[in-house]
Every structure is written in C-alpha cells, then in structure tokens.
Amino acid sequence: MNGPADTAAPAEPGAPPADLEWDRAVELIRGAREICLACHVAPDGDALGSMLALGQALRACGKRCVASFGEPFGVPAILRFLPGQELLVEPSRVPRAPELMISLDAAGRARLGSLAGAADRAGALIVIDHHASNTGFGGVRLVDPAAAATAVLVEELIRRLGVPLDRDIAQGLYAGLASDTGSFKYPCTTPEVHDLAGRLLTAGVRPETVSRELWDRAPFGYLQVLASALARARLERDAAGGRGLVWTAIARADRRGLPYEQLEGIIDQLRRTDEAEVAVVCKETDDGHWYFSVRSKGRIDLSRVCAALDGGGHREMAGFVWAGPVDEALDRLRALLPAEH
C-alpha cells in the first residue's frame, strides 16, 4: 500500500541536500511490505527518537514495521516517555533477512551490534545518519554530516513520504533534535534547526516535558554516585597540548546499584571545567567493558580521536568502548589528543 502522497514534494528552504538518495529511498519504502528499523546499540535520544518517529510514519503509510537495537536490549529510563514503543521487538525477533531494513544514527555496521548480520542479509538497506565518521555502509544512503541530528533527515524523509506530523511523531523528532544539539546550545544549532523545532512545536510537542524527561530528573541514588564521581575527578592541565583534560571513572561497584543508563548526565557536569578542553567519563558496563564518554569545547575534533579507538561520534561529542584496563585506554586517548595548542 502506498503512502498518502504519490510524488515527492519539492524541497523547502533549509531542507537537507537534494543530492542524497531521497527518491530511491522513497521508492523502496513504497514498494516494501514489511520494513525493519534498527538504530545503534545503547540508543540515545536521537537514535531512538528518530527510529520511533519513522516507525509511526511508516505505520501511517500502511506498512508492517518493527524496530529494534542490539543487546543489551532495554529502553533507557530517560527515553521511556517516547511514543511508539509498541513497535519495539527484541533483536532475536527481527527477521533474519529483512525485505527492507533502515539503519538510523549508526555510523557503521558494527554500531548495529547483533543486528549487523540482518543488515548484511537485507534485501535492501537504507542508511540514515549524520556522523562525519560514517563508514559508507548501506546500499541507499541518506547521510549528511552537516545535519544537526539524524532527526533532521528523518523529518525530511517523512515529509517526502507525504505523512503529516502528528504529536507523537513530532515528539520523537524533537527529542532527537534537542538531544544532539545539547538542548539547542551546540554550534550545530542553525536557523534551520530552530525552524524545524518550531514546526514540531506546532505539531503539539511540549518542550518542557521533553526537557524534564531528558535532563531534569533522576533518582536520589544518582546524586550520590555523581558526588563520588566528581570527588574522584582528575584535572591534567598539561594534556592536549596544554588545553587540559579532566576525567573520572565509575566502576560497577561505584554505582551502588544504580542502573548503568542513569550515568549519562555525569559528563555534562564534568565538561563545565574551565581549565579543560576535553572531559572524559569512563563508565564500566554490566558486562565488564568500559564505555568512554568524551566531550570537547570545539577546539579538538573528537570524532577523529575516538574513531582511532574504534569508536566515533561528532566533533564535540564522541565515545568508544574499551575491553581492557582503564589506564591503558586513557594513555591511548592522551596520545591521540593534539600536542600543540
């Protein structure tokens, strides 16, 4: 069954580049009976918000649709307010060889985790992403590193499919946009970003609700873990060519039973340090690996640094996973930071 519109509408001012493979993506979606959506492991607001928004739009087109992400499979507490979660299925329930698969906010197939094999076997794979570190995987690519969030590209695709924005679709897109612009304070916050935010608000999004869920709530135990993490923080003034590095580590035992997903906001406190260009929070996952959240204030391109450690991200916000000792990873990270001011 085709969507509400049979032809793509002309691009509006400020829309993503027209040279992306929009027409082919729309053609594949219109011709598919069932579509599988996948975002990167440990999804953030942009990954999950964009995926659920697109899933609801595809459902409005009459498509059978499932959405998932690789293990550990569980929606982070701060994202459980997002509409459309009835579309989510465990990775084991994703078809082994989907007719059409759409990857969202994943810079490479490895970021799909256990769903990478399904992506390889899919009849067609559309990749929607905005990471400069994107590896170039996928058959049809809607990849624009200039886009502030994957949500920007998803909104454009939804528009080209002729699906009007309702409140639930807009809620997911707004969560993605707000997440990857740092609540509209990062340099990627352009006039076009505000134009899109305005359209989403017109569709019924309540920004105070999104902001509260994403940034302004936590269990009391979080405050105790935060206090301990900040007490252990170390400032290395001479690192990064004298620009400074501040870091802390949170082992599983330090969490005192707090779920791993609740640690997300600690990096935002650490990055406020005036004397450090780079901030790092090393977080031990439940399976004993370490996830490094890395932030800069704009003078160092962290996407390149973390890509060298098999991670990725954006210029000012990136990360990587490490299976060995924390000190070893920190030594590698320091060596990759520019030595000249």
Image (tube, grey):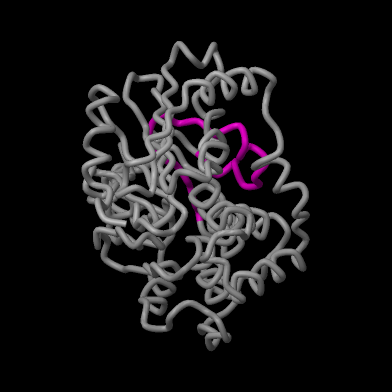
Q: Position of residue 156 (x, y in %)?
A: 53, 72
Quadrant hosting residue 12:
bottom right
Q: Which residues are magenta?
A: 64-88
172 left or right, relative to 277 = right
Q: Residue 185 at x, y = what percent? A: 60, 59
Q: Nearer the viewer, residue 253 or 6?
A: 253
**Residue beneath the point at 33% across and 62% down:** 132
Question: Does residue 102 belong to the magenta stretch?
Answer: no
Residue 81 magenta: yes
Q: Look at the picture and state if 10 lies above or below 312.
A: below
Disc tally is 0
Q: Residue at x 50, y 30 (%)?
A: 74
Which quadrant holds the C terminus? bottom left
Q: Nearer the viewer, residue 332 or 79?
A: 332
On screen, 31 above or below 265?
below
Relative to residue 280, is residue 184 depicted above or below? below
- Residue 165 lies, in percent from the top left, at 67, 66
- Residue 341 vs residue 17: left or right? left
Is 67 on the left-hand or right-hand side of 82? left
**Residue 85 relative to residue 146: left or right:** right
> Which residue lies at the image location 67% right of the left edge and 55% below the top edge?
171
User: Which residue is depicted at the point 28% across and 52% down?
Assistant: 108
| Above or below, 341 relative to 295 | below
259 vs 264, nearest the viewer:
264
Q: How far from the left and from the top, in percent, is residue 61?
A: 57, 65
Q: Quadrant of residue 293?
A: top left
